[in-house]
Image (cartoon, helix red, strand yellow):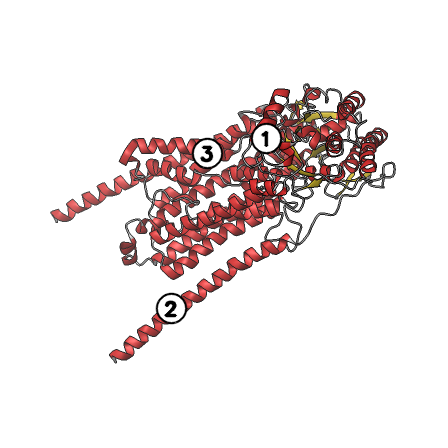
Amino acid sequence: MQETGESRAEWKEVNELYRQRYLKRLALLGTISALLVLAVLYSASVGTAPLSIGDVFLAVMHNIAVKTAGIPLIGQLFALFGEPQSGTAEVIVVNMRLPRIMLAMLTGVCLAVSGAVMQGVLRNPLVSPFTLGLASAASFGAAITIVLGTGILGLFIAGGSNYDIIINAFVFGLLSMMLIYGISRVRGTSQATLILAGVVLGYIFQAGVIILKYWSNNDKLKDLEMWLMGGMWGASWNAVLILLPIAIVCIVLLALKAWDLNALSAGDEIARNLGIRVERLRLYCLLLATIAASSCLAFTGVVGFIGLMAPHICRMLIGNDHRYLIPCSALMGGLILLLSDTFARTVFSPLEIPVGIIMYIIGGIFFLYLILRGKESHIY
Amino acid sequence: MEKELISCALAQKSGGIIIKNRLAIILAACVVLTLALCLAGCTSPTPAPSVTPTPGNNTTAQGLTFTDTNGKTVTLPKPAEKIVVLNSDCAEVLVAIGAKDRIVGVASSVKTNPSVGSLFANVTDVGNWQTPNPEQIALLQPDVIISYASSPPKNADQLTQANATIVQLDCGNLKTIVGDITAMGIITGNVQQAQEYSQYIQSVIDLVKERVAPISATPSVYWEYNKAWSTAGNSSGGDTIMYMAGAANIAGDLGNKTNQQPAVNQEFVLTKNPQIIMKYSGFSVTNTTLAGFSALRNDTMARTGIAGVDAVKNGKVYVISSTIAYGPKAFIGLLYMAKVAHPGAFQDIDPAAKLDEYAGRFVPGTNATIVFYPTPA
């Protein structure tokens, strides 16, 4: 009787501890979400055009009012706000800044979640969407279109257009995953096989990019270098409308596998004993992570480090539980990339720096910090 | 029983291997197919050849119609009142046809161009020519944005939000320059001035053609761009100048539209033994002093593998500025090339004086820096 009472008290204590940790984690996710909202507001209000915060707000409201003019009440409600003072405010805020903010956030979200999931399934903290050769393959796809002026659609439409580059980069990004899948079918899905295969494929595609660089002339070389540096120049509502459903579907499906990923982090054997089909889970997660990452990279070019940095910061803040790690990485990735891109487009205005360069600098410094922290950092 | 189990297990295993192999084959086929599709596309759609528009007959029901450098037909509702230029060669053409006051914004590279940059000191900077700042352009509210045809802006989707038409013109190669100037005349409505300007350039091209036609000798030329051993391939700007000037490009068989500056090596140049060497002063156009040109020439002549060729032995190694090797002043580069290749036929022609005349008549200041070294006899 006494024993039962003791175990109940222990259970209650454990339950209370769990509840506290749960609330703490929710509070952390709430804080990062609030920071992200603030970052969006800040990013929408700064730029080359000197627009007041009031004008930025009125530009958005007026645009919604015009779009909802036919809907009673809602249209009238938004129409109450009036027009911004600056005649160009609406075009600048709604058609230029907002799609760019959305693209930066979506890219950050997708790359960070891909990184967190890949690190989980391969149980290696230094794995990122790029370790499996994704970036090199997408770069090779883009390079084919830029240099040779043709893409996967070359048979049907004139090559060299931005959309041709996007489609080619996406297809080649997926191709890298298909190749890794093929190798894993023959040699199994052990972490070492997948990582080695990814690294080797990365080098092969990199060789292709170098050959194309060597062949290309001055103008094409500049175009290619620009793509390889990564930037949000492809931002438009069309890009956002394409990416948004892909990102939502991939991230929700990955988040649903959070329990399985938690089990997998204890080791393949334990996960198997818990009834998880490890090989299948690994390929399923890698495929979804690749689709999410390569669809973003196709629009932005190579944006490095975010898939490594965001999950590591979140691991330090929220722990290794994938139920929290995945949403936390998503928010953190969106926040970091949005702030970096805002810095990139405003610091030397009207000149812009490719955001990929900023990410390499921030990412490099962050990893130096982790190395200096030693074993606490959990990277080795 | 045991045998059956073993054979069954073996069969399953071999079946598994077969399935795995099949999958591998299917995947390999997918990879090959993807690459094949891409490469097949290489031979498909090519841009239509540039057509020279006829001035004075370009007004349609929709507005003004002209052809860009890529051969694409562009229609504007009316002559452009405000223009943003990302290409310094096109900026120079606009000045030459009297439309400088229409330019409301230029790329940073136009402002730093030593040949024409000083003309745009007070014009708004719109940033990098590859990724111009869309907000700055929206504030300027231009009717037209003129970009390079060979390298259009990466953020074209954002730029079109500013309700401006992006026009792709190079104003660079001698083959297409007259058509590009005519298009500029239509864009600005300064058709008469554009015609006068293009006729001036065409007259020089015709003069060279006329004098070169009866000459059968075609001296061989090695044209080197700013990177060592990177030469002028087929259909490049340098190749066009050499061809028009009655000279033989030793790398005329090399290169293509994708790679107009193929890399060769010492052995290739030694074997071809060119009679003339033309060395580009650099893409960045920062090398604008006599000392700089002289040092570049000496470096080129002292290079291993080039010292033994006829051009070096006879002192026929020249440094040519990129401002006259490509762009609207390429006709000056043509005159220099023709004079070097056929000194007898062009004895009375002074390209430097022609450049002074051009600067006085069309674009002031373009004769301020050195463009060719040493001066041909």
Amino acid identity at mark 2 = Gly
Q: Is residue A225 visible?
A: yes
Q: Residue furthest right?
A: B56
Amino acid found under the numbered disc labelled 3: Met
Query: What numbered label is drawn on residue A359?
Result: 3
B147 to the left or right of B349? left
Secondary element under disc 1, as helix, strand or loop, is: helix
Numbered label attached to residue B301: 1
Question: Who comes first in sequence, dot 1 or dot 2?
Answer: 2
Q: Is residue A295 visible in the rendered structure shown here?
A: no
Which chain is disc 2 placed on?
B
Residue A346 in the figure: left or right of residue A130: right
User: Outermost residue, left direction?
Assistant: A2
* Neighbours of disc 3 within 10 Å: few (<14), some (14-19), many (20+): many
**Rounded to the nearest whole Å, what is the CA distance between mark 1 and mark 2?**
67 Å
x, y percentage for residue A294?
A: 50, 47
Could you confirm whether marks 1 and 2 are on the same chain?
yes
Callout 1, which amino acid?
A: Met
Q: Quadrant of the C terminus of chain A?
A: top left
Mark 2, residue position: B16
Q: Nearer the viewer, mark 1 or mark 3?
A: 1
